[in-house]
Image (cartoon, rainbow, N blue to C red):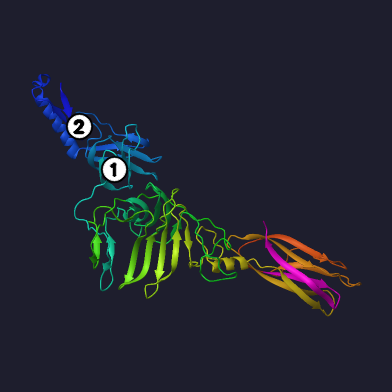
Amino acid sequence: MSTTYSPNYLFIEPAVNDPTTTNQWGDLLNLDMTLIDSALAGELILNVSAGGNIVLTSIQGQPDQARNYSFTFTGALHGNTIVLWPQGLNRNFRVTNSTTGNNTLSIGADDGTGNPAGTLYVVPSGATSLLSSDGTNVAPTFNDGFLPLTGGTLTQTGGVSLALNTPTVANRSLLYQTNGVNRWSWVTGAAAEAGANSGSNIFLQSFTDAGAILSNVMGITRSTGVINLSAIPTFATATAGSSNTQAANTNYVDRAITTYNAFAQSTYFPIAGGTITGNTNIGDGANAITVGLKGGSGTNRNLVWLSGSSLRWNLLCNGVAESGGNAGSNLQLQAFDDSGALISGVFSTTRSAGTLSFTNTPALPTAPLGDNSTLAANTAFVTRAVNAIPSARAVNVVISPSGTNAFIRLARLVLVVPTGGYAYIITANVTQAFAAGTVNTQLKITLNGSDLNLALNVIQQTNVTIQVFQFLAAGTYNVDMNWLGANANVSIDNGTISCVPAT
């Protein structure tokens, strides 16, 4: 039978007057109608939990996986997964990512060896995307009706808003790109809004030179306003002894920062020219949406806020050249004065490392005393925490008791023990010799008036030290160094008492 096939959907094209197809045209036509129906409205539901590269079947003139119009992929992903369309065939199709897990599901075209031939598209978890393939690359397909912008400003006499409007279960993204490839994304996640202000949290993502997610730099929970960072940010070093509410760096506190799961970017809406005035909504309220700022490597991509014609803020993907290794196209936030001149950068982060660097130390709420969570601390909290463990106190006392067995307090430390309690080494020390004839003299430590140890005789000794190891519950304690003796006019000029946390 001299049969050929259509170039993209591989429908049967039997040759006219071919004797081998005599009395078979009805069967061939019915089969073609089945294949056409599948291409227009067919749906494939496929479990892809096996992961890796999955090549959809493609058979000339026969039902197969790849010729369907709609695809729903399911299963728990245990690794990043790529689904590949047939090599060299133009296709338009719809994909729904119904998989679970924290790994990505990407769509691509087969190169003939089971590997991607060109650009991949990452389908966000829980999202449905309209895609097209030219046989090599896979990219989003967009409907008419979007607002094209290639420059200009958003102008309004009063305030102005750019709204990314979707259902609560869809991603809303603002993309910065280089030659159409993602570099940064502000994305509101697709977690459902289940009440109590949950869901629709926002994330800052960085991307590799190939446009794959590199890291989630920062996440903000809408219900609590808590910022989670994937790497510990760098802060300017505060002045020693500062007790304000600015964030502290590791000169003050050594704490790890909480990490969070990766999120993929959504289908994006291209803006290709024109001017927007007034409050403008972008999107149909039904599909995920992304606003992309495209530019070549080494160019700035800016999102600016103005008062009249004067700059106030600029969030930009900067023009540092992309020299490989995910370098370049870093993100900065800049502030401008009333005349529109640059005041300073507020923060910046490199795409390759994803670590936030602040020009000025940010202010943070003061954590409760004794808090040992992974929340960032400010210097007021750290100063309080450090001062709760007092340093040594010197004494310089002349004792002139009347009578015998006088009990004299030489020095006191007020010790604040944080929540959960702590173990301390409490030390009293006298570093001079006593005069000949000094008798019946003792040194002792008390805690809120109660003895912690037996008194130590110090008759005519030098460098006398008494020390006790004590675990104390949370609370405030008076730690006293005391002198017990019968002699009058005994001088102690070089005495100290200290409380040191036990290691």
Which numbered disc covers residue 99?
none
Where disc 1 sits, the SS reads strand
Q: Quadrant of residue 417?
A: bottom right
Instruction: Specify whether 90 is left or right of 310.
Output: left
Q: Quadrant of residue 196?
A: bottom left
Residue 369 position, x and y percent, is 55, 65
Amino acid, disc 2: Leu
Amino acid, disc 1: Val
Instruction: Give the residues in magenta.
Output: 478-503
Q: Toward the viewer: 154 or 197?
A: 154
* Residue plotted at (79% across, 71% down): 494
Q: Which residue is mark 2?
A: 10
Residue 44 position, x and y percent, is 25, 37
Residue 127's place in the image compared with 87, above or below, is below
First in sequence, mark 2 or 1: give its number.
2
For this orientation, the residue located farthest to the right is: 437
* Residue plotted at (12% across, 29% down): 30
Q: Answer yes or no: is residue 364 visible.
A: no
Q: Which residue is mark 1?
A: 138
Residue 101 position, x and y percent, is 38, 44
Q: Quadrant of the C terminus?
A: bottom right
Residue 35: within the magenta? no
Where disc 2 sits, the SS reads loop
Q: CA distance from mark 2 to mark 1?
A: 19 Å
Residue 55 position, x and y percent, is 31, 34
Residue 30's place in the image compared with 100, above or below, is above
